Amino acid sequence: VPLGETDVMNGREIIRKHEKGVAYGHIIADKPLFPVLRDSRGEVLSLPPIINSEMTRVTADTKNLLIDVTGTSQREVEQALIVVVTALAEIGGRIGTVRLRGAKGEFATPDLTPKVMRLEADYFRDKTGLDLSPQEIAALLRKARMDAVAKQGIVEASIPPYRVDFLHPIDLVEEALIVYGFNNLEWEIPNVMTIGRVHPTEKFSRKVRLLMVGLGYQEVLSYVMTSEEELFEKVLRPKKPIVKVANPVSAAFSVLRDSLMPGLLSFLSNNVHASYPQMIFEVGDVVIVDEEQETKARNERRVAAALADDIVSFERIQAHLDALLRSLGIKYELEEYEHPTLIKGRSASISYLLKSKTIKAGYIGEVKPEVLEILGLRCPVGVFELNLDPLIGERGE
């Protein structure tokens, strides 16, 4: 019996009918078997990561808690569990352990063994400019609730298990500085001849981001590194020269993107379970092969947008393009254009009509049904992509 229900349901029924099943069922819906937690009597306690059973409901009279954490990374799952149980222990709870059997054998969880990290006094002085002895550094860390001892120019600190944010000795430096007090650090004027300011490209990009948000779009950030499959095959683009990574760790990050649009479509394909309309955009760099450059490549700052809804037309996505460019004070024109990802006759090229010249800037259109099918998208999608670089110098930004 799922939490909040009175009727017995199997896994498939929960995914179809229960509120949490509808929201999160896509995580396990395509799997032949569903994971369940049972007690010694065979009663189902939970269908992770969807819903717990009604018999596990927590009330004001509950004395004992069984905490289960599910995820795709054992390290992150264990860290999340430690944070939860230590927070409960801080308000008076007692922590018990559970022995589990897995692919790596039998082990107890949660593991609350403190992690020991070493910090060299010279490293601390180099990063902070403070001439403190190892004993003084250790004293600061002890004030931060760590067991720390000084040993011949080195401080050994015992990190509480709930401090899962400690990854590097620089984290110990930061913790010691927090106790020392950042306001107690002496100010020093840098010995440089120039004064920093926001780069014109970033200043203009911020303006574009604000306008896109004002149009109702949500910004997404995707990796510059991607795969040839995502960049070309899934969106039916013919392969062309691009910057490739030598000896990539993963095929998923083997090339540098030359377009923002495939990343947006991939994002939509991973969020088909979310409500519609979905309006997303990205402002970021792409890398273009250019034999005239010293590095044989150049960066372009672009903006791309994607609109997914039950009904999407060329006119609807063009209205948003028009609003963006009009707000920037840019005149433009559209010309018939065939793009391998877009429907023929429902796509166009975009040109800026600048004072000095006309510049081809990008494209706009409706995504082909074949691409939607490949990506598993359930509704029409309209997109546009623009090169922002010509506008930065033109507007004096």
Image (cartoon, helix red, strand yellow):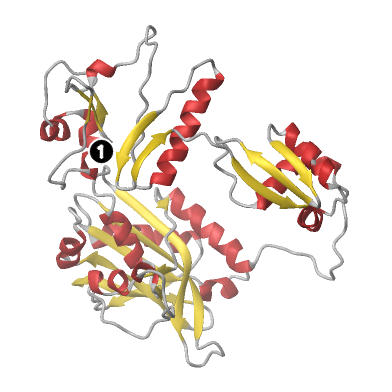
Q: Which quadrant: the C terminus?
A: bottom right
| Residue 200 located left or right of residue 381 | right
| Residue 4 located left or right of residue 163 | left
Residue at the outermost top position = 61
Name the spot of residue 350 as percent of width and height, x first.
37, 74
Name the spot of residue 287 as percent of width and height, x first.
46, 77
Establish if 169 lies above or below 140: below
Q: Nearer the viewer, residue 220 or 295?
A: 295
Establish if 189 lies above or below 390: above
Q: Nearer the viewer, residue 84 or 38?
A: 38
Residue at the outermost bottom position = 292
Establish if 214 lies above or below 99: below
Name the spot of residue 192 as percent of width and height, x first.
84, 68
Establish if 69 lies above or below 102: above
Q: Nearer the viewer, residue 219 or 94?
A: 94
- The residue under the point 37% across, 54% down is 280
- The residue under the point 54% across, 87% down is 295
Q: Quadrant of residue 259?
A: bottom left
- The residue under the point 35% across, 11% down is 59
Name the spot of residue 367 as percent of width and height, x first.
23, 65
Q: Disc 1 marks which residue?
A: 24
- The residue under the point 52% across, 76% down is 390
Q: Which quadrant: the N terminus?
A: top left
Say whether residue 157 is visible: yes
Q: Name the amino acid type tagged 1.
A: Tyr
Secondary structure beneath disc 1? Answer: helix
- Crowding near the residue tagged with mark 1, few <14, some 14–19, many ≥20 C-alpha atoms within 10 Å: some
Q: Nearer the viewer, residue 178 or 274?
A: 178
Q: Quadrant of residue 304?
A: bottom left
Say whether residue 178 is visible: no
Residue at the outermost front position = 106
| Residue 243 located left or right of residue 315 | right
